Amino acid sequence: MKLVQDMLQGHRLSLARLITKVENRDPDLAEIMTEIYSKTGKAQVWGITGPPGAGKSTLVDRLLEQLRMQGKKIAVVAVDPSSPFTGGAILGDRIRMQKHSGDPHVYIRSLGTRGQHGGLSHATKEVVLILDAAGFDIILVETAGVGQTELEILSLAQTIVVVLVPESGDSIQVMKAGLMEIADVFALNKSDRPEADQLLRELVSMVGMAEHDETSWLMPVRKTEAIKNVGIQELLSSIEAHQAYLTQSGKRLAKTRDFLKNEVKDILSERLNRSIDATFLTTSGQEVMQQLLNRTLDPYSAADILSGVYPTA
Amino acid sequence: MKLVQDMLQGHRLSLARLITKVENRDPDLAEIMTEIYSKTGKAQVWGITGPPGAGKSTLVDRLLEQLRMQGKKIAVVAVDPSSPFTGGAILGDRIRMQKHSGDPHVYIRSLGTRGQHGGLSHATKEVVLILDAAGFDIILVETAGVGQTELEILSLAQTIVVVLVPESGDSIQVMKAGLMEIADVFALNKSDRPEADQLLRELVSMVGMAEHDETSWLMPVRKTEAIKNVGIQELLSSIEAHQAYLTQSGKRLAKTRDFLKNEVKDILSERLNRSIDATFLTTSGQEVMQQLLNRTLDPYSAADILSGVYPTA
């Protein structure tokens, strides 16, 4: 496919068009993904999450600057599944995009929920594969929160940075929120605020108390002030240490397996959903629906009857 | 099944146990849902959503009081898919539960994301079916936002109330957030604030400008002050008017069809995911995984090969 060839040769407009095709679940999708796949598997994928207002976008921008100084090619995917009531992300992105618009080794893209009924985490996964094939060394995936959709999206990252601010509350709240389970590195941003040291001490002690042995990764807690460019180098060192740990411990392979298994699941689920939609338009599908509506057939028994809808290759 | 019989006879502990089985995706689930299904289809399901801090819980509580005065049996399902960084809901629920704990015709239940990897909207749908079978007249489903997961959850409601506050911003933001598409009724809460009238005028004019004909439902905008119990009766009238509209226009049937189709989809997807997990543990599944890891086989081609995993009845 010409578009894929152009993208692989560094043509940015082709890259943008391919990503749009992924977002729109284009009919060419399977062909595109089949063509690019042999070029993937080289990029590091980092996830950045945290509550609204924690300064994630600024922090991502600072990381981007540092990584560019190291000569790395960087892509940023900003995903906001819960945008309706927030909406600050888009403006922030626009400013970032302008700032890096002249740099051929930076690519920034926003993915949103609008028009997408389900499947945002699937689309994000495939966008990451395309950016990987395009030759970016590191792909930063930024999400706006850690709800269910965000967690699914973050599952594609090898290293997850959870950004907290002193106002995020005490360590008990952090633990209750399940952040201990998803974080690989904590960034305590806006750490010049007076309550920061208290939360820092609590986080460090919480990490130490968690069950671990000599092979475990102990989540570093890094103080940052993204707006003043303070603590960024240290945060970066911790992320790089986690990437090294993943390789040495064999956990990188386990993560890649999970990523691939989930991608196959998502592909089959998407086909299944299309197939069910088509079946309910047939005469026998309409009969099943009528019985469901009459409450003479229940959904689980209907699913048994409709098992024949599973699409084959 | 004895538990189902006891629940149908009004035994509350059995109801609670059945809901827990749904949450935990118990092996008995298909049998439970098959047994209860013929008793469903009578309840009205209302969805209440809005940004954090809009006063949804208080508003739901006021609606509950009014509906109880009419003698209706009411269930409330509070779903918080994005709880990690918020967390206020649980306290609010506890207070509500205490207040109504002596009333056998009120049942309040919280559903959360913890421990649930995906499938929250599927579980919520089945909890609603159980409450429907248990004989509740109206089931209020309250969610904390309108991200992707929340929208999926709200798709089970026949009438959706979007709660806004003057601080939610202007009508342009409301439109951009996609709220025009999901709302059946707007509740403008905390409407004693000075900016309320401006937003009210904008919302009313926005509703009037939206494309419509004589058969369309024009979303009412109701001013409420939940905390002072102001405007609740008027909000209730608008919800009841929408329910009447659904029946007269034939749209209730379309919504029920969608609900049932999605429930069948969710059941088949859940089975598919289990089946894929099992397949990747077999020898041939492991061979496919190895080729994926070697980048010699891409996920779309792997999906073709694994199409045989679709489970049959």
Image (cartoon, coloured by chain):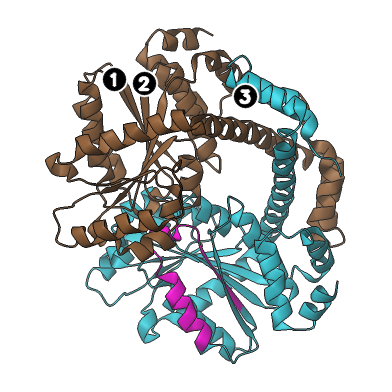
Chain colours: A brown, B cyan
| Residue at (78, 33) in percent of width and height | B309
Indicate the quadrant containing the C terminus of chain A: top left, top right, bottom left or bottom right.
Answer: top right
**Is the same chain shared between marks 2 and 3?**
no
Tell me where residue A257 appears, x and y as whole percent. Answer: 58, 31
Residue beneath label 2, please?
A: A137
Q: Is residue A17 above or below residue A108?
A: above
Q: Name the residue nearer the viewer: B188 or B156.
A: B156
Which chain is home to disc 2? A
Q: Is residue B162 above or below residue A188?
A: below
The reply to whether callout 1 and callout 3 are in contact (CB within 8 Å) is no
Kindly state the secondary structure of the residue where label 2 is placed.
loop
**Structural distance between the alpha carbons of marks 1 and 2:** 6 Å
Identify the mark at residue A72; answer none if there is no mark.
Answer: 1
Tell me where residue B42 appears, x and y as whole percent. Answer: 73, 72
Give the residue type at disc 2.
Asp
**Structural distance between the alpha carbons of marks 2 and 3:** 22 Å
Which chain is home to disc 3? B
Q: Name the residue nearer the viewer: B217 or A274.
A: A274
The reply to whether callout 1 and callout 2 are in contact (CB within 8 Å) is yes
Region of the chain picked out in magenta, as a range: B75-98
Q: Count neighbours of disc 2 (C-alpha within 10 A) and say few if under 14, some if 14 to 19, many if 20 or more.
A: some
Residue beneath label 3, please?
A: B299
